[in-house]
Image (cartoon, helix red, strand yellow):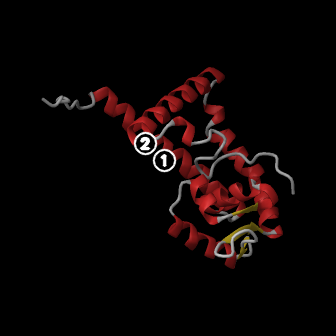
Amino acid sequence: MTKRTTRRSPTADALRTWREFIELSYRVRFVVESRLLAESELSSGDYVVMLALFEAPDHVLRPFEIAAQIDWDRTRLSHHLGRMEKRGLVVRRPCATDTRGIDVVLTAEGKALFRRASSPHMHAVQEMFVDALSVEQQRNLDDILAALGAHLARLEGDSPETRSDDQPRSGLSAPAQAST
């Protein structure tokens, strides 16, 4: 006999919390991303790609590495890289270690623009997110996000070891100190 699972529906309070989470996270992201675009002319997509490249050794990654880090499909990334390449932010060149592959390289212009964008971007993150929460609330939120991440990993069949905690999950991460 197969085990039957009973379906449960969220309570009214759970649905209210869910909706508040969705609406507020959208609003925070919208404001931060709007400021990024207004102050640097970089979209959040530009920023997340540039962040991955900025933190990479020699500012070079293979497209599949970028796609995996930022959780984009390869087609979306390819189109976005084309737009960034036209603006002089990145270049694609043949891969030295794989004759069938290409490398994506952050240009000097891309590095300079990314550096200029990072400070105002971090100020917006500070103002819109960090300043709203006490240190204790930030720790609680971190615990909540870790629990949600672990739960999703279990549901999706991922093991926690398959994703590195030091990889950015969005374009709104802070840049690490990288060499130029």
Asked if residue 159 is positioned above or below residue 1 in the image, the reply reads below
Within 10 angstroms of label 2, few (less than 14), some, or many (20 or more) residues?
few
**Extreme residue in the top direction:** 136
Which residue is the extreme one toward the right? Answer: 180
Task: Measuring from the top left, give residue 142's x and y in whole percent.
Answer: 57, 29
Which residue, given by chain and number where applicable, does mark 1 sit on?
A: 26
Residue sitting nearer the eye, 177 or 58: 58
Between 73 and 84, the one nearer to me in the picture: 73
Does residue 46 appear left or right of residue 106 in this picture? left
Q: Position of residue 146 (x, y in %)?
A: 53, 31
- Disc 2 versus disc 1: distance between alpha carbons? 6 Å
> How many labels, in total?
2
The quadrant the N terminus occupies is top left
Name which residue type carries label 2: Ile
Task: Tell me which residue sits at (70%, 50%) in the image.
Answer: 121
Asked whether 127 or 81 is in front, the reply is 81
- What residue sits right under mark 2 in the picture? 22
The amino acid marked with disc number 1 is: Tyr
The residue lying at 33 percent from left, 29 percent from top is 14
Does the residue at mark 2 contact the one at mark 1 (Cβ under 8 Å)? yes
Badge 2 marks a residue whose secondary structure is helix
Residue 109: mark in rendering:
none
Q: Indicate the quadrant where residue 114 lies.
A: bottom right
Q: Quadrant of residue 127?
A: top right
What crowding class fits label 1: few (fewer than 14 Cα within 10 Å), some (14-19), or many (20 or more)? few
Quarter of the figure that contains the C terminus: bottom right
Identify which residue is drawn at 43% across, 38% down.
152
Q: Position of residue 145 (x, y in %)?
A: 52, 32
Q: Is residue 170 above or below residue 46?
A: above
The residue under the point 60% across, 56% down is 34
